[in-house]
Amino acid sequence: MFRPIHAWIAIAALSIGAAGAVPLQPQLTEAEQAALDACFQKEDVDAGFACVEDLQLPLPPEMAEMLAMAGDPVLQEAYERWQADFDAAMVEQARALATRGDARSLLAAAMIVPIGYDEATGQPLPAAVDPAIWFDAARQVRPGDPLVAWLEVNGCPLFVSRCDPDAALARLLQVDGDNGAVQWLAVNAALGAGDTVAARTHLRLAAGADRFEPYGNALMTMLLDARTAAPLPPMPADAARVLAKTMPLERPATNADVIAMLSTAQWAVHAIPSLSGMLQLCGAGQDRPVLDAALRQDCKRLMAKLAASDSVLIYPSIALPLLVELASGPERVAWQAQLREFAWLSEQFHGLLTVGGPGLAAVDMATHAQAIANDGEVGAARQLLQRNGIPLQPPADWRPSHPRHRALLAPGNAPAG
């Protein structure tokens, strides 16, 4: 992992306080509460941890337990021992994957190598192996692997110092050019180069493509499969108890939980391409550019593909409001119904994942991560609601909290432009 255990626990404890998820005991004076709030605002985790300790205030039992665990040298030693074994197993697994020599295995090897950080400087520590070498080897394999090229186009992993997104996009168009999601990437590149004619061409190809398949599911599948196959030792009980508090879980943590957490973090960084090109051409709200008939049609067709994609939540969250704004008559009513259903899904999902949310402790990260791999983030969100007894359809009198959604769903709201 990337931090000493006392820092992980302090992060969890401080985030609970910062979110106001645990009500503080009523005997705190206004001055004491202000002092505690100041601790929660410190950017340095260890400084925030020390700040709370120095105040010696009566804290909620859960927060007090976390802070006590963070200062327990026995627990810290157990965790560090497990962490060293976990990291060593991942390095061994990465080396085994790299020996296969195919692009996807080389990419997986590069992505799962543990990267440590110096506590004082925050800079990466020297790794047992250099993942950049494996990533570069994956880029050289021909025919090119579309997932490797996708990652390079969207911004290389942090351990790679140099990328060539233009060359990667050329490879991606060659091996998967009939994929609307690939043409969408080309829109961004063309606009970045100042070529609006090429951007319009790629937009039209993206809108008319028979397939729209982003690579988020494939990325999560690769990360989970690569880590799960590692020769991991069992997690000691003390480490399992400590990690359960940081996630948090209502049971001891497992290696599968850690694998899911690490893989989901990487997936979140790399799964979403830039939306700037699409928004520049299709616009939104009062700043919308004037759309000619052909561009309006292409925008609507591409937005419909994004709205139907289960890959990541941000796709329908961007596309559905635009579709409501661009449509009129029965078509607009149909998009409003989809927007209302999605707004409900999104609000309930984020409510569960928020610190102190009703379902936070019940979120099984291993199950959720596998659901993302199988069914995309939207599908995983639906499953999470169902596991927590939340209906997928909003109540008849429900209204979204997001101001833009509320405005677009208001009766009689006329289409923009």
Image: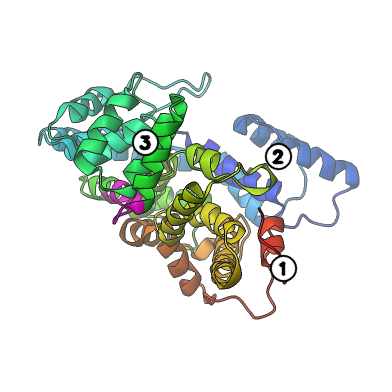
- Crowding around mark 2 (Cα neighbors within 10 Å: few <14, some 14 to 19, many 20+) is many
Q: Amino acid at mark 2?
A: Phe
In the rendered structure, which amino acid carries the disc numbered 3? Ala
Using the rendered image of the protein, determine whether residue 167 is visible from the camera's viewpoint. Answer: yes
Q: Could you say where residue 366 lies in the image, as x and y percent from the top left?
A: 37, 58
Highlighted range, magenta:
208-221
Q: CA distance from mark 2 to mark 1?
A: 39 Å
- Kind of residue at disc 1: Ala
Mark 1 lies on a secondary structure that is: loop
Task: Provide the residue designation for mark 1.
Answer: 410
Q: Is residue 134 left or right of residue 327?
A: left
Q: Residue furthest front?
A: 293
- Going by the image, does 85 lie left or right of 296? left
Rendered image quadrant of residue 412: bottom right
Residue at (50, 23) in percent of width and height: 122
The residue pinned by badge 2 equals 40
Is 403 above or below relative to 232? below
**Classed neighbour count for the residue bearing mark 1: other residues with Cα under 10 Å, few (<14), some (14–19), many (≥20):** few
220 magenta-colored: yes
Mark 3 and mark 2: Cα distance apart in space: 43 Å
**Which of the 4 image quarters holds residue 79?**
top left
Please tell me which residue is depicted at 60% across the width and 75% down the height of the picture: 394
What residue did someone put label 3 on? 186
- Mark 3: secondary structure: helix
